[in-house]
Structure formats: C-alpha cells, structure tokens
Amino acid sequence: MAPDIETIEKVQGLAKYDAGFVTDIEMDKAPKGLSEDIVRFISAKKNEPEWMLDYRLKAYRHWLTMPEPDWAKLKIKPIDYNDSYYYAAPKSMADKPQSLDDVDPKLLETYAKLGIPLKERALLAGVAVDVVFDSVSVATTFKEKLKEVGVIFCSISEAIQEHPELIKKYLGSVVPYTDNKHACLNAAVFTDGSFVYIPPNVRCPMELSTYFRINELNTGQFERTLIVADHHSYVSYLEGCTAPMRDENQLHAAVVELVALDHAEIKYSTVQNWYPGDEEGRGGIYNFVTKRALCAGVHSHVSWTQVETGSAITWKYPSCILKGDHSVGEFYSVAITNGRQQADTGTKMIHMGRNTRSRIISKGISAGRSDNTYRGLVKILAGAEGARNFTQCDSLLIGDQCGAHTVPYIESRNNTAKLEHEATTSKISEDQLFYCQQRGLSEEAAVALIVNGFCKDVLQHLPMEFAVEAQKLVAISLEGSVG
Amino acid sequence: MNNNVTSLPVKSRFRPENATHFFDLFDHNEYADQLRAQGLPTNLLERFKFSNLAQALKKASLTASDPQIHLSDMRFCAENNVVFDVAHNEPSLWTVARALRGGDVHLTFPKNTKLDQAIYLNWADHVGTMQNLRVKIKVESGCDIIFVEKTAARGNGWKNQSIEIDVAANARLIHIRLLDDDVASSLHTSVIGAVLARDARYECLTVNVGSSWSRHEYHMKLQGENGFAGLYGLNLLKGSQFSDSTILIEHQAPHCQSSQFFRNLIDDSAQGVFQGKIHVHQIAQQTDGYQLCNNLLLSPQAVMNVKPELEIYADDVKCSHGTTTGALDETPLFYLRSRGIPERDARRLLIESFVGEVLDKINHDPSRTEADALIAHWLS
C-alpha cells in the first residue's frame, strides 16, 4: 500500500521541534579544544580572581585522571572533548549591556520566539528571569525589585565578582569537583549560570527562572547554578532549556547545587527540552547533569520536579542529602523518550538525620525505539532514626521497539526506618483508548490525554506556567509514536 | 551411575587468595581456563555489589573434598546433558562450579513420571572442606516431581553448588531447599539455572536459617508459552550471618508468568541482600511478572540491601515489584497486647505469620513440618 498523504505528513511532523531554529549572531569564541590554556582563557574572559582560577585548574587536572562513568544503561559514543568550543559569547555582550534596552535585539527576538518574557511581558508573567545564551548570561530581570527584599539573583560570574564570600563558602560544597567526570569538567570550564541567595526569613516574592539556550555549532554548554536558602526562607526556581537542531551531538554538562539551611524550602523545577536528535538518532544534546541538594538545616525542605522530554542522552540524578533532622526531600519526575533517545535518570536520597523523610514519584514513558531507565538510591544511614521513604516508579511503554527499566537500590542500616518501594510497568490499556476514541478523539489526542493523566501526580507539582508548557510538551514529544 | 563422585584427590590447604593451591583444584576444561583468567567474583562487580565473597573466604581455611551426599531414590540417576548457558564475560559462581573438581548428580525423569514421594538429596558433613557439587535435573514432559534438598552440616566448610534444571513441556518440578548449615563458620553458594518449556512449571522454595555466609543465585529462562516460574525464599538471619538472594528471570516467550516472593528476617548484626530482576524480551508479550520482597529488621544493627530491577522490552506486559523494609509494626503488636497476649508471644505470633505466608506458597506437608521446626528453633 502506498503511503497516503496523511502518513507522509505525520512522518514529516516527527522532525517537529519548535525550538530548533538557529539565531545568526556574531560570536566571540575561544579556540576549539580543551587544555589548561582554555581554562585560563575562560577565567581571564570572566576577569576572575586568582582563587577561582586555582579552583578551575585543580578541577581540570583532576578531570584528566578521571574515568568516564560507564555504569548507566546508556550507549554513548566516545566523546571527543577536543572537538568542541568551550566558550562562545555573543559579540554584542562584550561591553556588558547595562539594562534590557541595551541588549542586542536579536537576542531578545530569540527569546521572544521561544516564548520567554524578557521585557514588557515579563511584568505580566511576574517571573524574574536570568537568560543564558551559550556561554554567558545575557540578562537578568527584576534584579532591583528583588534587591529590595535582599534576594540576590544574578549570573554566577557576577556573583564571583560581587559576592566572593558566599561563592567561596558554598561553591563545590555540595558537588565537589571530584564527584564525577562530568561535574569535574564543569568545575573546570563552567562559563555561566545563576546564583541565588535568599536571606533569612524571606519568602522570595516571585518565581525565579533561568533559561538556557545553546545556539552555536559544536559548542558545549557548562553552566553552574548555586542556590542558597538561608534559614526560614523560601524560593521557587524554574529552569528551561532548548537548542537548535544539528547533526552533531553537543555536550551539556551542568552542575546545580542547592543548600537549604534551617527551616528553609527550595522548590526546583525543570522542563528540559534540549534537541533530542532526529528519528535516526543523529544529533541531539548529551545532557550530563549533576544536581544535588544539601538539606543542611533542621526542618529544611527540597523538592525537585523535572519534566525530561529532550536530549539524545539524559544522564541526570537530582539528589538530596538529608542531613538536618526532620528534613524532607522530594523528587517528582516525568521522563519521556521517543525516537532513539536514551534516558537514565532518577534520584538519590541519602538519609542522615533523624526523622528525615523522602518521597520519590517517577513516571517513565518510552516510545519509538528509545530506552528509558529509572535508577535510584535510597540510603538510610545508621543515625537516621525514624526515617521514612516512599518510592513509586511507573513505566509506560508505547510500541514494542522500546525499553523501560527500573533499577532501584534500597539500603537500610537502621531498623526504625520505614521504606516502601513499588513499581509497575504497563501499556496504555485498550479500554481507555477505545473509550476516548469512541468519544471522538483521534488516537494521538487520546494517547496524549492518557499519558497526561499518567503523569498527573508529577505535573501537579510544577508551577502553573510550567505545568501548561509541560502538558503541551508531553503531547508533542509523543507525536508519531502511535499508529 | 554418575551420582557418586569421581575420586578427587584431597588437596592441601584451600586458600583462594593463595593462587597455587587454588589452581590445584582445577578440572581440565574450558571453565578452568576461564576461572584462571577471571578469578573469583569480587564486589567490584555490579552483581556482587553487596556480597564480598573474597572477604568471607579469607576466614576459611579449607581442604577440598568430595561432596558428602545421600540421595533417597537412586532409580532416576542417568547421565544427561542439561545445558544451561550463561554469558561468561565476567567472573561468576557458575564458572567456579564448572571449573573446580567436584561431584556430579544427574537425574532424569522419563515422560509422565509421577511420584508419591519426594526425592531427597541430603548434603551432609563438610567439616573443614570445600565441596563442589553439580546437579543436573532433566524433567521430561508430563512429569510431576518434588525434589527436596537438605543441608545440616556442623563446623566450617564451603559448599558450592550448581543446579541445572530442564523442565519439559507440561511438566512440573517443585524444588524445596531446607538449609541449616553451621551458622558460625560455613559458607554456601549456589547457582540454580532453569530452562522452562511450554506449559512447564518450576517452583522453588528456599528456607535458609544456616550458613554464616551464603549466596543463592537463581536464573530462570522461560522459553515456551504459558510457562510459570515461582521463586520463594525465606532467610532467617541472626548473629553476624550474611545471605544474598540474587534472581534473574528471563521471559523469552509470550504468555508466561513469573512470581517472586522473598522475606528476610534479620536480627542482631546480620545482613540480608535481595537482588531481583525481571527481564522481559521483546518477543515476550503478555508477560505477567511479579516480585515482592518484605524485610523485617529486628535489631538496630541489622542491615538490608535491596535492588529490585525491571528490564522490559515488550509493551503488552504487566510487571510490578514492591519492597518494604522496616521494623515490626507497632500497631498489630499493640492490638495483640491489648487483648492480653504478652509482648514476647505477640512478637512471636506476628513473626510466625510473616514467615508463614511464604511457606504457604508450596504445598508439601513433610517439608512444611520440617520448615516449621527450623523456624521454631530459630525463634526460640
């Protein structure tokens, strides 16, 4: 049977990745490759103090000795670290725009196209945004307003200049550069990222957000985010990311560190939509991210929510170290893989303090020829009297060419701790599908609806603006996976 | 007759870290070369992450000897060639069982054999020795067999065992293992590999109260439609005992079912490990896989490590796993005490019901009586 027009359109629709355009803009780049000189170059570009350069060099030297982590259920082509640019900044950024009005209109246009409010729309949305374009932060909105209540929200390069005492104290305190190869590389060559400090007893008046965009060809993005919530404070932070469609794999190795002191609460939400590569698995971002939170104080609370739809390969385990007594860690995740994407993602909950609680809800959806793995660790140390964990990971398979895997580790050293784990794997039930279709929904719309229902437990933890975007993303990511 | 062991020259001190003596035990076959090249499994391997065999062996100072076994019914001893293959790319106990000299027991049950009585394999004394036993059981179509293994050795020793099982179409094998070796100083390692044909059933219940260090691996391959593999286990550990149950169930055909139900009761500073994996191949549509592991920690020093895994490549499947770890629930305890039952008795009642649910999975009265006795002794 010859394919009809609808089929052809559907196939073309597969390549639909709205954020896949390239912005043509003059860039200032470091020479290709990785060496001590490049590390010095980045540090010099950023006009960094001596101690920062030392830190980077130490990390770089250690990186050379580290093995590639190979325990994940991922097939990764060997990465040629010398075939990539480690620094790329828009030329127009050379003499630092003082306000949004000075920012290159091309950049603003790029973000407008992506639906990121930087100017007037920002006021309506009521979200403060830091936008990172390749290697540099191009703008941070609402800085002044945040300053009034004492919140520091700026790019990390700025923080190194202006708040060295905070950076010295906290940078690398949760994820040391010796942690793993990708985090180590990040420590050596990170170019920008966001820094947030919430002073004691302050409830951050608006949502904070960072938007990451990789634009240049052959450029790796290495951003670093550090959020410190002082005692009795609260902050909700959102992170989004996109990249153009390219045939080469691009490396994204980020580090996110969260520190929550006594009674502080941090809510960190991510919608990850890096370019996933095409149907044949060409191109796409390698998303190797180390995210970790330290619940240092008593009654501190960290909550990770992630929606992972993009990237050719995702290697990401947002974790919580529950050190303070009565601290709480939460992890809500939706990971969707389609085409030839591979995802190995999950969390680690390390219970150290008494009466610490953690909750893990993970929903994995695999379609096409993709592989989706949940990998998690719940560890109860001997001192974690009365610790409590609940884990639920469900997988949904769409099509018979994909794989769904669950690899949880549960280690208990304290008998007063209560641990529960449950996991299920299933497919979309014919009954549900039939019911929806019989009410006039197309098969694709029905699948999107059912999958959204499947993810509901997680999506409801996202801030409102993100939840809407995430729901749409779920539908788009699954396009072409049925029929 | 191959159940009696080929004579094995008794070797001098068996110390695995002392390579020369260890190598003296090698058989002359491909596995020996492999073991020489790969060595013993260490906890650097993912599959041995929680079990440190090398350290357990360090304390053992053993000579090698023939397995001291007794088989209750010799009628079915016949050479057979059950072949259970596993990948040999990393060190495994499977290779150890093949590579070292030991005894062989081959059982073949001809078509439609139905026995009133179970067949018993008693593996008795092992004092001061390392014993290596290879069992092959071929169950032809239409059979219904109960096979019971028992160990109750005192003193130190290391029992290493491989059991190859082939269950043909429409046959059923019930395999019961009552393990009660010396808790102070004996090691027990075993690998059970079973291949199941169409409509075949294999059920295995392991009741382990013995051995200072043990590891039991189960590897099932469901190769015909509508096969069923049921693995049930009970580990009762105290003192400084260590026990690891590692399971891999491969669904290689559609419409099969598998069920795992393991419970660990851990007292003092004992350590338990459960690693279970259901692997559903792409062809195995309509698989129903189930796994449950409940663990009771009875003392503050007790340690439990659990890793329940799913690896699924077929979409039309129902797979689930659940695991819980914690202390004895205070609510039912309070309820019983409020009814006038002393705390000690109440605890005992709750523990008995906790272990009883696993024993209920297999219906074989003589074994049940023995298992109950082992448990009662453990509780006293």
Image: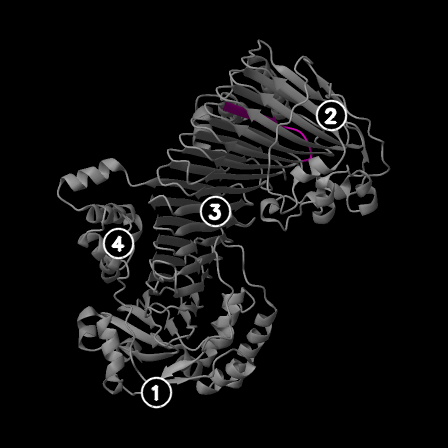
Which quarter of the image is occupied by the C terminus of chain B?
A: top right
Q: Specify the amino acid type for callout 3.
A: Val
Q: Please give the label number shown on residue A91.
A: 1
Residue A271 seen from this side:
yes
At numbered mark 4, what does the secondary structure look like: helix, strand or loop? loop
Residue under pointer 2: B153
Q: Residue B215: which quarter of the image?
A: top right
Q: Crowding at label 2, few (<14), some or many (≥20) Cα neighbours within 10 Å? A: many
* Disc 1/disc 2 C-alpha distance (Å): 79 Å
Residue under pointer 4: A479
Q: Crowding at label 3, few (<14), some or many (≥20) Cα neighbours within 10 Å? A: many
At numbered mark 3, what does the secondary structure look like: helix, strand or loop? strand
**Residue B60 falls left or right of residue B262:** right
| Residue at x 54% of width, y 60% of height | A69
Q: Are marks 1 and 2 on the same chain?
A: no
Task: Identify the magenta region.
Answer: B201-213
- Give the main secondary structure of the magenta stretch: strand
Image: B103 above or below A25: above
At numbered mark 2, what does the secondary structure look like: helix, strand or loop? loop
Q: Nearer the viewer, mark 1 or mark 4?
A: 4
Q: Chain of mark 2?
A: B
